[in-house]
Image (tube, rainbow, N blue to C red):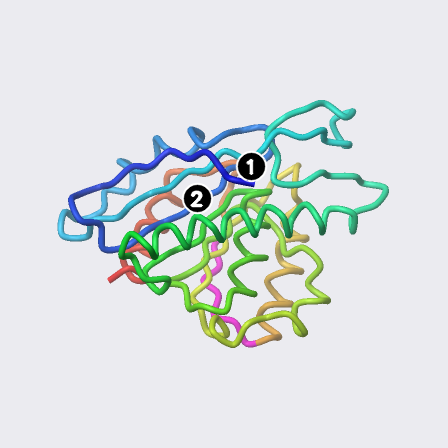
Amino acid sequence: MALETIELDTGPDPQGCVIWLHGLGADGHDFEPIVPLLDLPEDLAVRFIFPHAPERPVTINGGMHMRAWYDINPGAPASATSDIEASAAAVLELIKTQQAAGIASNRIVLAGFSQGGVIALHLGLRLDQRLAGIMALSTYVHDHESLPGEASLANADVPIFMAHGLSDPMIPITRAITGREALHNLGYQIEWHEYAMDHAVCPEEIIHISQWLQQVLR
């Protein structure tokens, strides 16, 4: 599964890369407008890659076809695993492409919102090459019970940025906290933020994202 992408460099010869995955029903353009709002310093050139998820029927939406990293079936939540693994494999190819272009894996951040965050966490925590960080926005950890046996030592201490809205009606913050605590119990470093918002990204969060990206990509 080759993913179509949008690429945006903040300067010449990027020193780092952020692969940012959108949520259910959106596309790669969804977070493109955030790049200038991050106001990254001129001496930190970053390549942002925004992939488009493939289109697939989504059970929770009556089988409607839309861009989705995996199907959501409330009656069988574990059934998403095969889709998640396939999407993670496709994102891994994007990492390999950037490595071939001269950006090492430890200069790459995997980021995602909602469904995209599930993929970022699933792949990043299992990847056998060190990443710069994992950014998980308004999301959760899928099947955290299997993580101890599948996690990679290469990213055992990878910086993780997690943020969630206090009034998120799509993914309740309690679900995100459950994942956060599971990761804490496995020894992961987590920078946690919560905001007075729903299933969205707010201006204060963008400031914190910018600060974190500058820390992990320096």
Q: Residue at x 41, y 61 (%)?
A: 133
Task: Locate residue 33 relative to residue 1 in the image: left or right.
Answer: left
Q: Disc 2 residue type?
A: Trp
The N terminus: image quadrant: top right
Query: Which secondary structure type mostly characterizes the magenta part of the structure?
Result: strand
Residue 23: image tag: 1
Q: Is residue 141 above or below residue 184?
A: above
Where residue 111 sits: x, y (%)?
45, 49
Question: Which contiguous range is marked in magenta?
Answer: 187-193
Where residue 35 sits: x, y (%)?
31, 38
Q: Secondary structure at mark 2?
A: strand
Q: Disc 1 residue type?
A: Gly
Residue 20: image tag: 2
The C terminus: image quadrant: bottom left
Task: Locate residue 210 relative to residue 184 in the image: left or right.
Answer: left
Q: Is residue 50 above or below residue 19?
A: above
* Residue 70 occupies quadrant: top right
* Residue 129 occupies quadrant: bottom left
Where residue 118 sits: x, y (%)?
59, 50
Q: Is residue 197 above or below residue 188?
A: above
Residue at the outermost right position: 75
Characterize the local packing of mark 2: few (<14), some (14-19) or many (20 or more) Cα atoms within 10 angstroms: many
Residue in front for this viewpoint, 207 or 25? 25
In the rendered structure, are the residues bearing label 2 and label 1 in contact, judged by CB atoms less than 8 Å apart?
no
Where residue 110 sits: x, y (%)?
44, 53
Q: Secondary structure at mark 1?
A: loop
Magenta highlight on residue 75: no
Q: Residue at x 38, y 50 (%)?
A: 97
Residue 85: image tag: none
Characterize the local packing of mark 1: few (<14), some (14-19) or many (20 or more) Cα atoms within 10 angstroms: many
Magenta highlight on residue 192: yes
